[in-house]
Amino acid sequence: MVKKHYWKLEYSIALFVMIGVILLIMPFSIENTRQANFISKWNETFNRIEYMFSVINAHISDDMIKSFNKADTPDEREKLLLTIVKPYLRINTANYPIRHYRPRYINGNRIYKGQRYFFDDFYFAENNTIVGIKDIKSDKADDVFFLMMFDINGILPPNRWGKDIYGVNIYDGGKIEPFGFDKSMDELKKDCSEAGTGINCSYYYKIGGGFDD
């Protein structure tokens, strides 16, 4: 009877330990699966955006180019680009994301008006993706003309750069590059850590960087 009692006790302890380990690991496993899904969606989104701009560049009219050249304000240029990409991304300009939608850096810090990656307006696109467009006025052909951001999880959390938010630079002629393409691998890893901004994850994950490195 004593041996049987000890066997049951050891079995119970082992069972509790196993349950504890499972409960400890499960949140990390779920989070890793979710992040892997975000990255997969971002890669799909980038490929579509790249193709979209190649089509736009091949068919853009002279009148539209003149309109861009005549536009005096960032708001005018942003609206022109919005008009162009709207049918491709199925952007809904009649229904805006809630006022409290405020993207943050991966480290949780707020993005303030006046900072490069602050977007004034957001729009719902297909599959409830949120899209932002920002004009970067430049007279040099090699400089960035626009920034675009994509929250592939919509208004649902985490709403963090490098988690569910990614973006691209748009250049003259419709060429695009993911944020971070000009950074070193060490810079990319650092920025994609929980202490970074997450902005440059757009390129880091595109080239196969791991979110658990």
Image: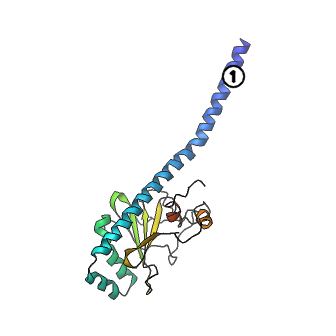
At mark 1, the secondary structure is helix
Is residue 150 in sight in this rendering? yes
- The image quadrant where one finds the C terminus is bottom right
**In-front residue for pair 113/26:** 26
Query: Residue 51 occupies which quadrant of the picture?
Result: bottom left
Question: Mark 1, residues whose alpha carbon is within 10 Å: few (<14), some, or many (≥20)?
Answer: few
> Is residue 151 rendered to the left or right of residue 125?
right
Residue lying furthest right in this view?
2
Q: What residue type is labelled 1?
A: Leu
Q: Name the residue under label 1.
A: 9
- State the image coordinates of residue 50 (x, y, percent, origin top left): 38, 67
Q: Is 202 or 209 nearer to us in this picture? A: 209
- The percent position of residue 66, horizontal first and vertical second, equals 30, 86
Q: Nearer the viewer, residue 184 or 146?
A: 184
In the rendered image, the residue lying farthest to the top is 1
Question: Image point 59% across, 37% down: which residue?
Answer: 22
- Above or below residue 205? Residue 77 is below
Residue 89 occupies which quadrant of the picture? Answer: bottom left
Which quadrant of the figure contains the N terminus? top right
Q: In this view, does 91 lie above or below 13?
A: below
Q: How many marks?
A: 1
Residue shown at the point (55%, 58%) measured from the top left: 209
Determine the residue positioned at 67% across, 28% down.
13
Coloring scheme of the render? rainbow
- Residue at 55%, 62% (x, y): give it: 106
Q: Where residue 8 sits: x, y (%)?
A: 67, 20
Q: Where is residue 39 in the image (x, y as percent from the top left)?
A: 47, 56
Examine the image and state in which quarter residue 184 appears.
bottom right
Q: Is residue 45 left or right of residue 103?
A: left
Residue 91 visible from this viewpoint: no
Q: In this view, does 74 lie above or below 51?
A: below
